[in-house]
Image (cartoon, rainbow, N blue to C red):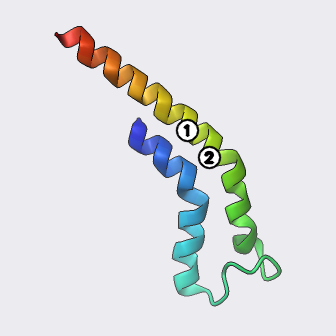
Amino acid sequence: MVLAGILFAISPILITLVSSLLIEDAFNEGIGSIGALPWLTILTMPIGFVVVIVGLALGTRNHVSRR
């Protein structure tokens, strides 16, 4: 769950980085929607942060209950 939260949080940036290998000037917002995709990180970062915190809390609870 923690890894999924981290991947979700940075996925817009990862998608743009991968597409920059195929498309020249992929970070340019004027060319297309791929250039504007990193702005989506403003929404995905807080959601991913909450998922990471919940995952850590659940993992800690499960670890303590095993003792």
Residue at point 55%, 55% (across, down): 10
Q: What amino acid type is highlighted by mark number 2?
A: Met
Q: Is residue 7 above or below residue 17?
A: above
In the rendered image, residue 38, in percent from the top left (x then y), is placed at 68, 63
Residue at point 48%, 51% (across, down): 7
Q: Which residue is mark 2?
A: 45
Residue at point 41%, 35% (across, down): 1
Q: Which residue is mark 1?
A: 49
Q: Is residue 20 above or below residue 59?
A: below
Q: Is residue 59 left or right of residue 38?
A: left
Q: Nearer the viewer, residue 26 or 57?
A: 57
Helix, strand or loop status at disc 1 = helix
Q: Quadrant of residue 48?
A: top right
In the rendered image, residue 26, in percent from the top left (x then y), is placed at 66, 81
In the rendered image, residue 4, in percent from the top left (x then y), is placed at 44, 43
Name the outermost residue toward the right: 30
User: How dense is the environment of label 2, judged by Cα within 10 Å: few (below 14), some, or many (20 and up)?
Assistant: some
